[in-house]
Amino acid sequence: MDLSFIINELGEDREQYFNAIAPPIVQSSNFAFGTVSAMRERLLDEFQGFLYSRGNNPTIDILRQKLAALDGAEDALVFSSGAAAIFAAVFSQVQQGDHVICVKEPYSWARQLLENLLPRFGVETTFVDGTDSANFEKAMQPNTSVIYLESPNSLTFSLQDISAVAALARSRNITSIIDNSYCTPLYQQPHVMGIDLVLQSATKFISGHSDTVAGVLTGTREKIRKIFTSEFLTIGSGIAPFNAWLLLRGLRTLEIRLQRSAESTRQVVAFLKAHALVEKVYFPLDPDFPQYELALRQMKGAAGLVTIQLKATRREQVEIFCDALRHFLMAVSWGGHESLAFPACAALAEGDFDPQEEKHRMVRLYIGLEDADYLIKDLEQALGKMGDA
Ligand SMILES: *Cc1c(COP(=O)(O)O)cnc(C)c1O
């Protein structure tokens, strides 16, 4: 399917709503029926029709069709957060006594689920270094039911060989799940590589405007239907119609925003790599990135996030750099119009800073839609202040 068709036309039946160009926000919790038999039919199966907006809703349905198609999947579910998509995906695939294999440094709330919540129900997780596919095989147990990937991750951009791990999972009848937030379906297609369930935080690039929190999960119709009728309706963490509408609006410009951010990111990376106070630059499509070949093989692009490791010997220097930034806002998250800085040391108690620890000197930057030179000048002056300190 053409990307332009998906973004501009798919799922939009404008004759149903006055030929309006923008889809309506159907702000209704429930839907009426003309006959008992029509109601009975819907009560038996609300997966594809409209009964109650915890399940389906016309605005959300348009979004659902587009997001499934973008992933090259049969169907999708849209959640009120990426974390809810992670929860539903994993929870739907495990039973008491099962075992999960997960990459070493998954998104923090995926870790929380696997490390602290699921053990209460007898589900244990082994965390492995995903840069070597053999580690998944080594961690395998007879009761392994899920392999959970995140490639690249959103701090050091560590990758997994997605096709290799997916093939291993298939051969053992294990469900493979990936967090594809960094790439979005435009820059990486995990279903094509054999992954069963693909999720992403739509809060990031899909929304693109830092104004809504949402998540997406895609897979075969059979798998998605099963999750819809059990976890999705039970947890009740579907997206609200207005937030779905914001995501539809975000999707219209997804491709062009990614292109702009990717181009600026390349320029910023070139600047940072040449700067004396930057010890290391992490960016998956940089030829010096340790997994560059793999990134080229399985990713079509990379935009926005880049992490720098500062040449600093004291916490104050990292803080002076971050505090001096004028056009990068200091905040968590990413994927919006605005450039951001997230210093790893902000998550550390002041006394815990260890200059020997590479991670403590890391600052994750997100390159938004501003002009690249405008951002580079800002980085230059902030690095200068750090150098003077
Ligand atoms: C933000 C994020 C999530 C969680 O998504 P929310 O929408 O914040 O719940 C999951 N994975 C990655 C990689 C993220 O960056």
Image (cartoon, rainbow, N blue to C red):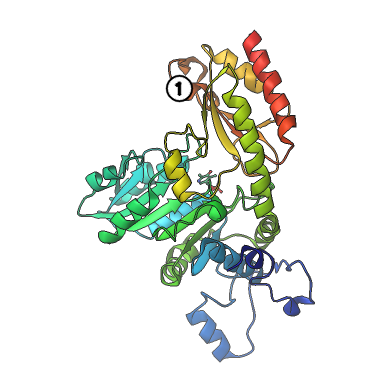
Extreme residue toward the left, this view = 142
Kindly tell me whether residue 81 is visible in this rendering. Answer: no
> What residue is shown at x 64% (from left), y 16% (from top)?
320
Q: Quadrant of residue 22?
A: bottom right
Query: Where 347 sits versus 103, above or below?
Result: above
> What residue is shown at x 80% (from left), y 77% (from top)?
18
Kindly tell me whether residue 78 is visible in this rendering. Answer: yes
Q: Quadrant of residue 57?
A: bottom right
In the picture of the structure, the residue carrying the numbered disc 1 is 358
Q: Quadrant of the N terminus?
A: bottom right
Query: Where 65 sits versus 195, above or below?
Result: below
User: Is residue 1 toward the left or the right of residue 252 in the image?
Assistant: left
Amino acid at dot 1: Glu
Q: Quadrant of residue 2?
A: bottom right
Query: Where 21 sits versus 91, above or below?
Result: below
Question: Does the numbered disc 1 mark a residue whose Cβ is under 8 Å from ligand 1?
Answer: no
> What residue is shown at x 64% (from left), y 31% (from top)?
268
**Front-most of 52 and 49?**
49
The spot of residue 160 in percent (x, y) is 39, 45
Q: Secondary structure at mark 1?
A: helix
The spot of residue 65 in percent (x, y) is 58, 68
The spot of residue 19 in percent (x, y) is 79, 76
The spot of residue 187 in percent (x, y) is 54, 51
